[in-house]
């Protein structure tokens, strides 16, 4: 694995050649296939991440352990002709979050078991996130408690590192995973002073834990550069506001990691990379684009076969099992219905792995078969794909159109991260 590529990004920025990498945060098979196919074509490193709630030793909401996720990604890489020597696997928000309802000692024991499982499975990039209070903690936690807990998890990672040099991401100003839960207008950016303090305290905690050799492998700090998305709006990156934080990076010997960069414009993503926010997390935008394509194909199937069942089937599924959206989407019944299907936060993504949703998608693909879809219907219902179809760059079959919907987003990130 090319975890050294992340260290190389620091050097590139320090010498005035800013580059970045997208951190792909999804377990969806089509997203993974699209990512790895694009990586094979570009012959550049690919960073794919799993979160603590999504994948852990208990299975997470995907039902996968870190070893299972590793196997899924490697199987997809083989299918897409991607060289796994260019693959970086990351663990995101690794800490006690899934078990924060427990007393701290128990929650941290569970977190240590999770980190051990990630490290043993070959994950080379570990984001240590111990910022949340547990059942018997006094909130908010002090930075000293946070960093001491983070160092204890790093110790476990080092002990189970499976023969590789793990690189670490630190940071206590961590955005809500998956985006904000309401309309967002303004954000408080991480202050340069707080960023420097966080780095210093983590390094001291590493030294106190006997992890002096791992300090140089702290490659990135999670910060809030002023980007976020809610259910129905996106807060765009403002380079002028982020300039002090960007400038402060140069004295820290690392790069920044920006979460919730989904739905930013190509110009904003390029500016983030140029300003030192070199690891760009993206997840919901990828499955949002995939859902757009699925619903477009559902409408095309209605025109061609007289049957459109995917969107109505997904509505029935989400109504029957509301646990993934009910506490997040508010307002009138009509507004909640719109958010279930079209929200930027894309909480419908939690349902695609269910057997019911998989059956609906398989039925849709079977009805469209592998026949070319008429260009006029692609223009009507999948207009983003139409230029590629007309130029011959996009195969007009259902399966190819789904993969292409994800790759259009990936291309935006690739161009932002690798400026000419």
Image (cartoon, rainbow, N blue to C red):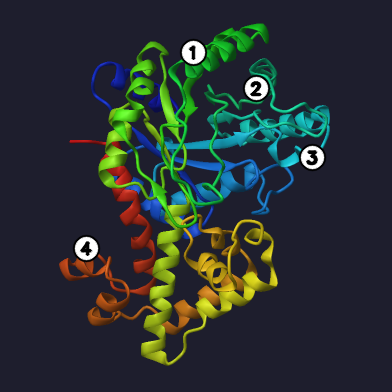
Which mark lies nearer to you, 2 or 3? 3
Q: Is residue 287 left or right of residue 92?
A: left
Vertically, is 32 above or below 156? Answer: below
Element at label 3:
loop
Q: In the depicted view, which residue is nearer to us: 245 or 99?
A: 245
Q: Quadrant of residue 386?
A: bottom left
Element at label 4:
loop
Mark sitting on residue 216: 1
> Where residue 94 sits in the image (x, y, percent)?
63, 34
Say few, some or many: other residues with alpha carbon within 10 Å of mark 2 (under 14 / 14 to 19 / 20 or more).
many
Say few, some or many: other residues with alpha carbon within 10 Å of mark 4 (under 14 / 14 to 19 / 20 or more).
few
Say few, some or many: other residues with alpha carbon within 10 Å of mark 3 (under 14 / 14 to 19 / 20 or more).
some
Quadrant of the snapshot with the C terminus: top left
Which mark lies nearer to you, 2 or 1? 2
Element at label 2:
helix
Residue sitting at x 39%, y 66%: 402
Say few, some or many: other residues with alpha carbon within 10 Å of mark 1 (under 14 / 14 to 19 / 20 or more).
some
Residue at the disc numbered 3: 101
Residue at the disc numbered 2: 150
> Where residue 203 sits in the image (x, y, percent)?
56, 11
Q: In the depicted view, which residue is nearer to us: 37 or 380?
A: 380
């Amino acid at each position: 694995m090319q975890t050294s590529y992340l260290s190389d990004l620091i050097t590139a920025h320090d010498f005035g050649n800013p580059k970045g990498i997208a951190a792909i945060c999804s377990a969806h098979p089509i997203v993974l296939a699209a990512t790895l196919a694009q990586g094979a074509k570009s012959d550049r490193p690919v960073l794919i991440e799993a979160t603590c709630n999504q994948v852990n030793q208990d299975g997470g909401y995907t039902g996968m352990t870190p070893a299972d996720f590793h196997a899924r990604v490697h199987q997809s890489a083989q299918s897409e002709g991607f060289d796994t020597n260019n693959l970086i696997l990351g663990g995101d928000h690794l800490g006690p979050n899934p078990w924060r309802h427990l007393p701290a000692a128990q929650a941290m024991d569970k977190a240590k078991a999770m980190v051990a499982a990630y490290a043993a499975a070959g994950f080379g990039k570990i984001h240590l996130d111990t910022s949340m209070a547990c059942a018997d903690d006094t909130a908010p936690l002090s930075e000293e408690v946070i960093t001491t807990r983070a160092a204890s998890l790093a110790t476990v990672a080092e002990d189970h590192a499976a023969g590789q040099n793990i690189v670490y991401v630190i940071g206590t100003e961590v955005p809500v995973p998956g985006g904000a839960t309401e309309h967002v207008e303004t954000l408080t950016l991480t202050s340069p002073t707080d960023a420097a303090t966080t780095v210093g305290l983590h390094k001291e905690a590493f030294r106190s834990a006997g992890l002096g050799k791992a300090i140089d492998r702290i490659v990135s700090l999670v910060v809030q550069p002023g980007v976020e998305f809610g259910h129905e709006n996106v807060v765009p990156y403002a380079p002028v506001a982020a300039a002090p934080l960007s400038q402060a990076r140069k004295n820290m010997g690392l790069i920044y990691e920006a979460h919730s960069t989904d739905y930013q414009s190509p110009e904003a993503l390029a500016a983030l990379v140029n300003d030192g926010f070199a690891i760009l997390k993206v997840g919901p935008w990828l499955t949002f684009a995939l859902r757009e394509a699925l619903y477009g194909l559902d409408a095309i199937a209605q025109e061609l076969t007289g049957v459109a069942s995917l969107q109505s089937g997904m509505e029935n599924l989400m109504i029957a099992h509301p646990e993934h959206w009910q506490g997040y989407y508010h307002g009138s019944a009509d507004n909640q219905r719109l958010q279930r299907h079209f929200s930027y936060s894309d909480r419908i993504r939690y349902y695609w792995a269910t057997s019911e949703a998989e059956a609906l998608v398989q039925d849709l693909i079977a009805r469209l078969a592998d026949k070319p879809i008429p260009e006029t219907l692609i223009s009507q219902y999948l207009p983003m794909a139409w230029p590629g179809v007309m130029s011959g760059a996009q195969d007009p079959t259902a399966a190819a159109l789904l993969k292409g919907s994800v790759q259009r987003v990936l291309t935006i990130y690739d161009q932002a991260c690798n400026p000419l």
